[in-house]
Amino acid sequence: MNKIGTKTIETDSLILRQFTIEDAHDMFSNWASDPEVTKYLTWPAHQDEAFTKTLLSEWIENYQDGTYFNWAMELKDTSAVIGNISVVHLDEKIEGAEIGYCMSRACWGKELMPEALKAVMNFLFDEVGLNLVAAYHDSRNPKSGRVMDKAGMKYEGTLRAAAINNQGISDRVYHAMIRSDRL
């Protein structure tokens, strides 16, 4: 595994890059304060921009670690930061990562998240050298599963009552891709 950390990735519509403290306003106003965006997540909607700024400060410090992968999703045409995608769990022993993501509700349904997920998966396979990239969603949030499918992940199974989020105890619906799936 190559411990290269969060590097800039460019797609047709997005620039995936490290967060800066200047992203606090976009992050707060575009997704982190929206209870609809955080509905199926493990963290509550942010109550004020000061909290968002504090969190970003922590994330920015973590960029010094070559095993920290957390991208701001910036729209190329407007430079607005509309979401984030990150490795939420890394297992170096099996060369595997679990991905999490969220995005501004105003951008839902525009194929931006599958585009970002594909790009991050390619980076993790090709640059970092991972063998497995996985993600899961709450069974009550099938749209997140469609993002995974569109990015080329395969349904792996459902773990019943195996997680907790802002909706309470939930089923984890797993999707994954391994390096050999790309051939």
Image: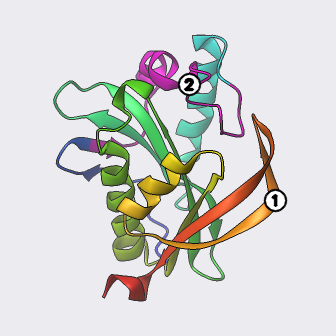
Indicate left or right for 34 with 121 as reference: right
Q: Is residue 96 above or below residue 167?
A: below
Residue 108 highlighted magenta (yes or no): no
The amino acid type of the residue labelled 2 equals: Ala
Indicate left or right for 157 with 60 as reference: right
Measured as percent of width and height from the top left, residue 145 is found at: 51, 56
> Which quadrant of the figure contains the C terminus?
bottom left
Q: Residues within 10 Å of mark 2 (few under 14, many from 20)?
A: many
Measured as percent of width and height from the top left, residue 100 is found at: 56, 51
Q: How is the image coloured?
A: rainbow
154 or 119: which is nearer to us?
154
- Residue 5 appearing in the image: no
Q: Residues within 10 Å of mark 1 (few under 14, many from 20)?
A: few
Which of label 1 and label 2 is nearer to you? 1
Quadrant hosting residue 157: bottom right
Under tag 2, what secondary structure?
Answer: helix
Instruction: Identify which residue is drawn at 44% across, 21% down.
Output: 30
Q: Is residue 180 above or below residue 146?
A: below
Query: How many numbered badges does the structure rendering display?
Result: 2
- What segment carries the magenta color? 15-44
Instruction: Identify which residue is drawn at 27% across, 42% down.
Output: 15
Quadrant hosting residue 92: bottom right
Between the C-alphas of marks 1 and 2, the distance is: 25 Å
Under tag 1, what secondary structure?
Answer: strand
Instruction: Identify which residue is drawn at 40% across, 84% down.
Output: 181
Instruction: Report the residue marked by disc 2.
Output: 32
Measured as percent of width and height from the top left, residue 143 is found at: 49, 47
25 or 150: which is nearer to us?
150
Instruction: Report the residue marked by disc 1.
Output: 162
